[in-house]
Amino acid sequence: MQEDILNIINKKRLKQELSKEELEYAFIGYLNNKIENYQMSSLLMAICINGMSLRETVDLTDIMLKSGTVLDTSKIKGIQVDKHSTGGVGDKTTLIIGPILASLGLKVAKLSGRGLGLTGGTIDKLESIPGIKLSYSNDEFIKNVNKVGFALMEQTKDLAPLDKVIYNLRNATGTVASIPLIASSIMSKKLAVGAKYILIDLKVGSGALLQTEQEAKELASTMIKIGKSYDKVVIPVLSQMDTPLGDNVGNALEVIEAMEVLKGKKGHLRDLSIELSSVLFAKATNIGLKDAKKKVNEVLDNGQAYKKFVEFVENQCGSLDKIQVSQELKDVLSDKEGFIEKISAKKIAEVSLNLGSGKKKLSDKINYGVGVVLKKQISDYVKKGDVLAQIYQDVKCDYSNEVLDAFKIVKEIKNK
Ligand code: URA
């Protein structure tokens, strides 16, 4: 037995293709505690470095999918859609798009993940709402979807449980940024929930899992092919992740900002949420993009989408009035005058992670109230001493220099 897993690791180390049986032996063995953490970590690292063929990636997706059950979508009334982001900094679009699409009559049944690498996870964000329940049986989940139109939960032992254990291990072993691992992880969750139309927001840039457009396009093409083999429509959209999305980074802070956008706050986060919702709504209902955008704007402007968000949280037992952010605030002041040319998503995410908003190792505990709020955005003109950002923290620490370092301030903006 011991030898088999070593052979499999060595094959991948030597850039050879693994058969479906070998992948099953290693991955299902890991789920059943027959393969050790260190052995799976080693295999994941070999996959990260040497990649996988499309056939291996499709097989791994299938193994992950079949490690659990598949939601009986015949019980969901209406057009079922799904949305997933490959992960970014300050990316709280799910909390905005889910309620928008549900307000428009679509059914959004969403399995979400936790933070991965420097990127935040929707489950961690929602857990900042006291009382919220994010694990359900398949039947309860379907009941929530039919009742509210938008329901969200974590992977369970029923739906893609293998992805859940591998996801946690990848996060703690530096094996996140791999196209086949990301594609199989995302697609196994999407296929388990069964929506016909799946929008994937592929983030590219310093604060994303993928740094180049080329990698994002490769991931998109892999996911489209996996989707096709299950008769699903995968709609990829590429969006930049060099700058944090919106102003707030950190779990509770991001939930608060999602609500602000649903209540009318303008800016890039709202624009992107409108774009993604419209693309998915247009495709799923077979209408033009312009008409879809009009309807999306309507439910945002008339407050229906915000009401839907509140309904969703209350239906899942959360108390929005009890959400808390850290009380110790530190202002980060500009050390010069000029225009803001760049705000590094990576640097802001590192500070947020160091404050405790995510896990660096499996046993870490998340601090839901910490994070960074940007007070200035790209192109803003600032004077020396202006507040660029505020750090929300609980313990005595000083990350002002690191946050300041995330801002590039110049005399003149080129290509404004
Ligand atoms: N989101 C996922 O669900 N899995 C990944 O591997 C990356 C982003």
Image (tube, rainbow, N blue to C red):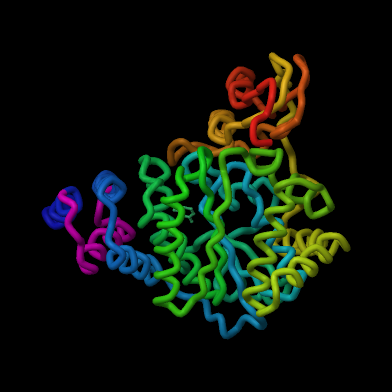
Q: Is residue 22 magenta?
A: yes
Residue ID at (78%, 50%): 261
Q: In what quadrant of the picture does the C terminus appear?
A: top right
Q: Which residue is at a point 65% across and 38% down the rendered structure image?
A: 249
Q: State the image coordinates of residue 342 (x, y, percent, origin top left).
A: 62, 31
Residue at x 66% of width, y 22% of height: 410
Q: Residue furthest right?
A: 302
Tell me where residue 100 appears, x and y as whole percent.
Answer: 74, 64
Q: Nearer the viewer, residue 156 or 91?
A: 91
Residue 333: which quarter of the image?
top right
Going by the image, does 10 lie left or right of 303? left
- Quarter occupied by residue 181: bottom left
Magenta-drawn stretch contains 214: no
Task: Tell me, yes or no, if residue 144 can be seen here.
Answer: no
The image quarter in which residue 292 lies: bottom right
The range drawn in magenta is 14-36
Q: Quadrant of the N terminus?
A: bottom left
Eyeballing the image, is 199 above or below 253?
below
Find residue 49 and report its horizontal and vertical position in percent.
28, 45
Reply above or below: 72 against 412. below
For the point 20% across and 60% down, the residue is 17
Q: Is residue 247 above or below residue 124?
A: above
State the residue in front, 128 or 96.
Answer: 96
Q: Is residue 217 visible?
A: yes
In the picture as drawn, the residue positioned furthest to the front comes out as 415
Q: Judge from the rendering whether residue 59 lies leftward or rightward of residue 80; answer left or right.
A: left
View extreme (bottom): residue: 74
